[in-house]
Amino acid sequence: MKILLACDGSEYTRKMIEYVLNQRGLFDQSHEYTAFNAQIPLPNHAASVVGSHATHEYYEEEARKVIDPVVERLHGQGLKATSAWKAGSLGETIADYAQKNGFALIIMGSHGHGAFGRLVTGSVANRVLAHCTVPVLLVR
């Protein structure tokens, strides 16, 4: 089974990875894991000033800071893991990437904002759920 691990580098990503590693009955070596990071796009004006090559390098550098340690941790536990990243609206980008690349499950950490916080700002998890047909496991 292909499993997408949505990573943002926060404490919630760490908790999600620990959950996966502690549930070896569910998440074992038979699965393929992809550590995925969605990058918030630079404003169009800023991106046009620095150029597409520099913008791409910036996104990749920022994403690697998040996903490379996750892949190393999974490899250290004997799991097959790759990484990927894409710039775009966070929730929609995660959902779109999972659907277009044939993932069977998305696992992501939830920041646990209260109802008022979700009402005011929304949440990445809510946007993934709203835009995705792939099952999603939220870890708190």
Image (cartoon, helix red, strand yellow):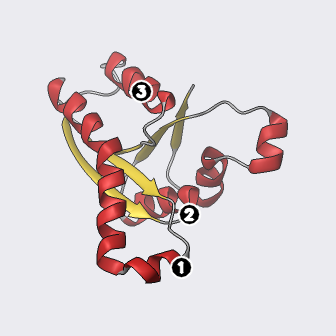
Q: Is residue 60 visible?
A: yes
Give me the C-alpha separation between circle 2 and circle 3: 22 Å
Q: Which residue is mark 1?
A: 44
For this orientation, the residue located farthest to the front is 49
Say what amino acid the circle numbered 1 marks: Asn
Where is residue 74 drawn, in percent x and y?
23, 31
Which comes sooner in the sequence, label 1 or label 3? Answer: 3
Image side of residue 7 versus residue 137, left or right: left
Image spot of residue 128 (x, y percent): 58, 52
Q: Residue at x 38, y 28 (%)?
A: 17
| Callout in the foreground (2, 1) | 1
Q: What is the quadrant of residue 132 in the picture? A: bottom right
Q: Please, what secondary structure does the residue beneath circle 1 have?
A: helix
Secondary-structure class at tag 2: loop
Q: Counting residues from the N terminus, which is met first, the one under dot 2 or under dot 1?
A: 1
The location of residue 29, given as percent across then percent down, is 19, 30
The residue positioned 48% from the left and 64% from the top of the image is 96
* Nearer to us in this view, 31 or 94: 94
Q: Residue at x 34, y 62 (%)?
A: 58
Report the residue marked by disc 3.
Answer: 14
Mark 1 closeness class: few <14, some 14–19, many ≥20 residues within 10 Å: few
